[in-house]
């Protein structure tokens, strides 16, 4: 019992985050899109949604 | 008056970038133009303010009564991340102009140290609700202030004649050092 | 890529601290003494390696769309475990590092390596890459801390975090000649800038002979 409650809580929060992330991924950008910062190119934070390595993922999901 | 001194000290004396070194990652990348610095600052203020209040409320009314304080880190980071995703989705759907101004910086804020720091600090210092509101508002204002000053300096630095090894990020660090020195002169204010 | 190349990649060419500018928050803040720096880097290496291994082991099962949420859950759990272990076994180090242990969760290095390497390579290679990047981080933060502690206090000292026994404590510069600026944020920024510039010079010196030969 002592382990179940936190694990369930964790699973619930993880589920909320995963679904919010997925819904956000599916929502298309409005028309003035790809106005991304030029300086983002030298940034190496690859977990950021604006990193070039994530662009193919978005294209994949749409098609 | 304590709230006012908390407000002032969080902006100028314990500035989150120049004194606590947090929020540095976008500091290097986004601070090249003043307009983008303003957008980034606005987005950060919005995210930190509301997510800190939500996490504070969650800690006080859910985690503490159930004796699950050790879940604070995981809860906070997941709440912050979900909040950012939801906000981005809402902005995308309902306001393209707001998206162009603030929304494009939102993905970068999820893993920003500053957001998680404010959420954790509110708990660690044992702030009441009002103190949390003041602190969560003051910290991103300090962040925005430094970001705007920094981007204005950097716009000029980009066209100056900087020695080759120092070009780009190293000279930005030296500018940050000088700014840190300047801000530390305000230490006797409160 | 051979194992050694994997390791040395994280140490010099793609040094996460000075070349990629990842994880700056913790590097600048924790580098005031060598003991703090080494304690922090051990924590980072542990989290980095274990998270790389777990994510690499699960890479075929995680659906590609929600991979970032899964990574964050894994890393957050690991960091909390490490934090609780540190709170129990090394309490002084835990208080000295303060809020920067939980902030390992949002350390760009760990999420970045999980995304860039562990999600595409085998468990063994990911583990080695984690250790390599962790050692690069250690090298970076150690150099920064050594310079800062040397100039700010004149002495280099290392304390065993488990029982607070002093391992060594050497005074190199007499106290009248120390520069307290290095203990302050401004000194941290300046030292970092100089070290980053030095790495840039080293990288360009490596490129020049290659260009001349070609």
Image (tube, rainbow, N blue to C red):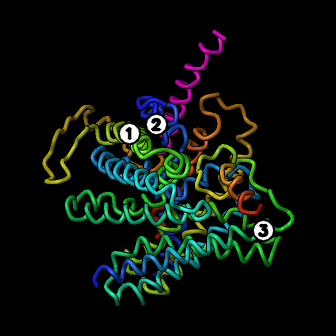
In this orientation, which residue lies closer to the viewer: B66 or C168? B66
In this orientation, which residue lies closer to the viewer: B90 or C64? C64
Q: Residue at x 65, y 50 (%)?
A: B29
The chain that hosts pointer 3 is: A
Q: CA distance from mark 2 to mark 1?
A: 7 Å
Q: Which residue is mark 1?
A: C135
The percent position of residue B128, horizontal first and vertical second, equals 43, 86
Q: Residues within 10 Å of mark 2 (few under 14, many from 20)?
A: many
In the displayed structure image, the side of residue B121 where residue A36 appears, left or right: right
Does label 2 or label 1 sit earlier along the sequence? 2
In this orientation, which residue lies closer to the viewer: C166 or C82? C82
Residue A28 disc label: 3
Q: Same chain for the residues at labels 2 and 3, yes or no?
A: no
In the displayed structure image, the side of residue C64 where residue C61 appears, left or right: left
Give, as a single range, the part of the protein colored magenta.
C189-214
Q: Which residue is mark 2?
A: C10
Q: Name, please, the residue furthest toward the right.
A: A31
Do tag 2 and tag 1 residues touch (Cβ < 8 Å)? yes
Q: Residue at x 74, y 71 (%)?
A: A27
Query: Quick check: B53 above or below C201?
Result: below
Query: Quick check: C140 above or below B164?
Result: below
Please identify the dominant SS of the magenta region. helix
In the displayed structure image, the side of residue B149 where residue C110 appears, left or right: left
In this orientation, which residue lies closer to the viewer: C103 or A14? A14
Q: Quadrant of residue C126?
A: top left
The percent position of residue A3, horizontal first and vertical second, equals 30, 79
Q: Residues within 10 Å of mark 1 (few under 14, many from 20)?
A: many
Secondary element at image label 1: helix
Q: Name, please, the residue furthest toward the top.
A: C213
Q: CA distance from mark 2 to mark 3?
A: 37 Å
The chain that hosts pointer 2 is: C
């Amino acid at each position: 019992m002592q382990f179940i409650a936190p694990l369930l809580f964790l699973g619930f929060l993880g589920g909320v985050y995963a679904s919010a992330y997925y819904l956000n991924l599916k929502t298309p950008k409005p028309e003035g899109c790809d106005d991304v910062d030029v300086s983002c190119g030298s940034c190496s934070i690859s977990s950021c949604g604006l990193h070039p390595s994530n662009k193919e993922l978005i294209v994949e999901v749409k098609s | 008056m304590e709230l006012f001194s908390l407000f002032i000290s969080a902006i100028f004396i314990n500035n989150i970038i120049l004194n606590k070194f947090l929020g540095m990652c976008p500091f290097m990348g986004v601070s090249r133009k003043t307009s983008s610095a303003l957008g980034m600052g606005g987005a950060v203020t919005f995210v930190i303010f509301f997510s800190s209040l939500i996490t504070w409320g969650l800690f006080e009314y859910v985690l503490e009564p159930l004796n699950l304080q050790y879940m604070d880190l995981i809860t906070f980071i997941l709440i912050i991340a979900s909040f950012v995703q939801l906000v981005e989705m809402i902005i995308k759907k309902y306001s393209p102009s707001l998206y162009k101004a603030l929304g494009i910086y939102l993905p970068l804020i999820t893993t920003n140290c500053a957001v998680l720091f404010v959420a954790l600090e509110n708990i660690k210092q044992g702030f009441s609700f009002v103190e949390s509101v003041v602190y969560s508002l003051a910290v991103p204002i300090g962040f925005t202030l430094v970001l705007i000053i920094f981007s204005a300096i950097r716009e000029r630095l980009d066209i100056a004649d900087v020695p080759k090894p120092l070009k780009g990020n190293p000279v930005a660090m030296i500018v940050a050092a000088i700014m840190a020195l300047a801000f530390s002169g305000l230490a006797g204010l409160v | 890529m051979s194992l050694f190349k994997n390791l040395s990649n994280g140490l010099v060419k793609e040094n996460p601290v000075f070349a990629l500018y990842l994880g700056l928050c913790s590097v600048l803040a924790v580098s005031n003494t060598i003991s703090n720096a080494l304690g922090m880097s051990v924590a980072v290496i542990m989290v980095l390696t274990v998270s790389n291994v777990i994510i690499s082991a699960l890479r075929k099962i995680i659906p590609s769309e929600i991979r970032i949420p899964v990574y964050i859950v894994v890393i957050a759990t690991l960091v909390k475990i490490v934090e609780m272990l540190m709170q129990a076994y090394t309490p002084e180090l835990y208080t000295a590092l303060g809020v920067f242990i939980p902030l390992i969760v949002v350390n760009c290095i760990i999420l970045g390596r999980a995304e860039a390497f562990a999600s595409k390579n085998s468990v063994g290679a990911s583990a080695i890459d984690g250790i390599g990047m962790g050692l690069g981080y250690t090298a970076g933060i150690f150099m920064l801390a050594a310079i800062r502690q040397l100039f700010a206090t004149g002495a280099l000292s290392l304390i065993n975090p488990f029982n607070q026994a002093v391992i060594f404590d050497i005074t190199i510069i007499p106290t009248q000649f120390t520069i307290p600026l290095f203990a302050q944020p401004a000194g941290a920024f300046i030292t970092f800038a100089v070290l980053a510039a030095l790495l840039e010079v080293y990288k360009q010196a490596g490129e020049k002979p290659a260009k001349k030969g070609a």
